[in-house]
Image (spheres, rainbow, N blue to C red):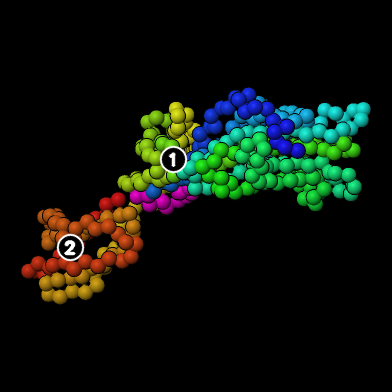
């Protein structure tokens, strides 16, 4: 059966803008300890292209229906996403069962700058292990270019598969990166044979997530107490990370990132981390001559190290003899002069 016989014209659909998803915080890990005072906050973000994929706004927001079968909104105690699910059944079940087909359709454009595109959904069918010679009912999820051109069948379920004897809900995943830059129609179709009374499949939690090179703006919040508010805004960027320097040591921090697009803001959950205790590395004398001394010390990346020298602790006059140099994570050596009385005192200065 051609899709053209199942759908209404697309201009009947009222399309709503897909929400801007919240960032997914990556590093530091939630609850991390001994985090360097010079650190990088990082997160990921994927655009959500489908509208109302969990049917929280009913069956008409973002979706178009077609065919003789009927999709209805149902509630269930084991919902996979949100509070609603979509349930399909044929209205021609009594007094004589007859064939019926119903579809939910959503048109979506995959942006040309998408790097990945992943479609996910959950489905549930009653397990029917009894063999039949008549056609089986089916639940099919497919992609169409237009009302008469099927691009790909993503998955078909009949209820006879052994997985339904073990699971009530099954999660499906498909890679749609081959359709980047195209406008396609996602079609969720339930059909049943005339000799079988009902199929009643459930579907829920449709999402089409894409990683893009064109990112929204992100607002980064950081503080030492929750909740985080406007006073905790420390930066705004359209990158996926933000470098920090000079955090107070041995301190519990809370952070959160918000994505902002078209006037819509969505915040991530709040995470926490604790900075490390400030402990300076020791300076060790490696070798010396009558007028020179070589010292060594351990370093870390994202920090700068300088050495100051004094010839007389009583006067406490310190001079920088080794300029501020970025650490490499490996030990560092410095060749320093000794004054005429062959005496010197050194201290290490660490700049975050």
User: Residue 160, percent across and down?
Assistant: 82, 48
What residue is rendered at 12% in x and 62% in y? 311
Q: Is residue 345 left or right of residue 66?
A: left
What residue is rendered at 70% in x and 33% in y? 4
**Quadrant (top left/top right/bottom left/bottom right) for the N terminus:** top right
> Mark number for residue 45?
none
**With respect to residue 339, does 11 lie above or below?**
above
User: Residue 35, percent across and down?
Assistant: 41, 51
What residue is rendered at 69% in x and 30% in y? 7
Rendered image quadrant of residue 193: top right
Rendered image quadrant of residue 141: top right
Q: Which residue is mark 1?
A: 215
Q: Choose the circle earlier in sequence order: 1 or 2.
A: 1
Residue 83, visible in the rendered structure = no
User: Residue 34, percent across and down?
Assistant: 42, 52
Q: Does the magenta run of residues contain 34?
A: yes
Residue 156, visible in the rendered structure = yes
The residue segment tinted magenta is 24-39
Q: Is residue 62 left or right of residue 343?
A: right
Residue lying at the far left in this picture: please name it. Answer: 340
Q: Is residue 205 left or right of residue 306?
A: right
Real-space Cα distance between discs 1 and 2? Answer: 52 Å
Q: Residues within 10 Å of mark 1 (few under 14, many from 20)?
A: some
**With respect to residue 13, does 22 lie above or below?**
below
**With respect to residue 129, does 58 lie above or below?**
above
167 or 138: nearer the viewer:
138
What residue is rendered at 56% in x and 38% in y? 183
> Mark number for residue 345?
2
């Amino acid at each position: 059966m051609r899709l053209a016989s199942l759908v209404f014209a697309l201009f009947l659909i009222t399309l709503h803008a897909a929400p801007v998803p919240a960032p997914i915080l990556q590093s530091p890990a939630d609850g991390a300890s001994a985090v360097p005072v010079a650190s990088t906050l990082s997160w990921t973000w994927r655009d959500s292209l489908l509208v109302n994929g969990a049917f929280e706004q009913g069956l008409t927001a973002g979706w178009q229906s077609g065919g003789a079968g009927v999709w209805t909104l149902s509630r269930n105690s084991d919902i996979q996403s949100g509070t609603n699910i979509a349930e399909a059944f044929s209205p021609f079940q009594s007094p004589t069962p007859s064939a019926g087909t119903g579809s939910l359709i959503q048109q979506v454009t995959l942006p040309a700058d998408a790097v990945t595109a992943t479609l996910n959904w959950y489905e549930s069918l009653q397990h029917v292990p009894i063999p039949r010679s008549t056609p089986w009912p089916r639940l099919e999820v497919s992609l169409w270019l237009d009302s008469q051109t099927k691009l790909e069948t993503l998955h078909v379920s009949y209820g006879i598969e052994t997985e339904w004897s073990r699971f009530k809900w099954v999660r499906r995943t498909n890679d749609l990166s081959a359709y980047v830059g195209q406008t396609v129609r996602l079609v969720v179709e339930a059909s049943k044979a005339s000799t079988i009374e009902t199929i009643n499949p459930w579907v829920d939690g449709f999402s089409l997530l894409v990683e893009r090179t064109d990112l929204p703006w992100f607002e980064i919040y950081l503080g030492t107490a929750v909740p985080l508010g406007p006073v905790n805004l420390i930066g705004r960027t359209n990158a996926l990370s933000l470098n920090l320097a000079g955090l107070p040591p041995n301190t519990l921090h809370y952070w959160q990132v918000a994505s902002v697009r078209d006037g819509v803001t969505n915040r991530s959950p709040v995470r926490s981390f604790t900075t490390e205790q400030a402990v300076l590395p020791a300076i060790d004398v490696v070798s010396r001559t009558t007028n020179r001394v070589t010292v060594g010390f351990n370093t870390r990346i994202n920090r700068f190290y300088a050495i100051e020298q004094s010839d007389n602790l009583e006067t406490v006059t310190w001079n920088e003899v080794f300029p501020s140099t970025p650490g490499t994570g490996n030990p560092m050596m410095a060749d320093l002069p000794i004054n005429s009385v062959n005496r010197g005192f050194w201290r290490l200065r660490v700049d975050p």
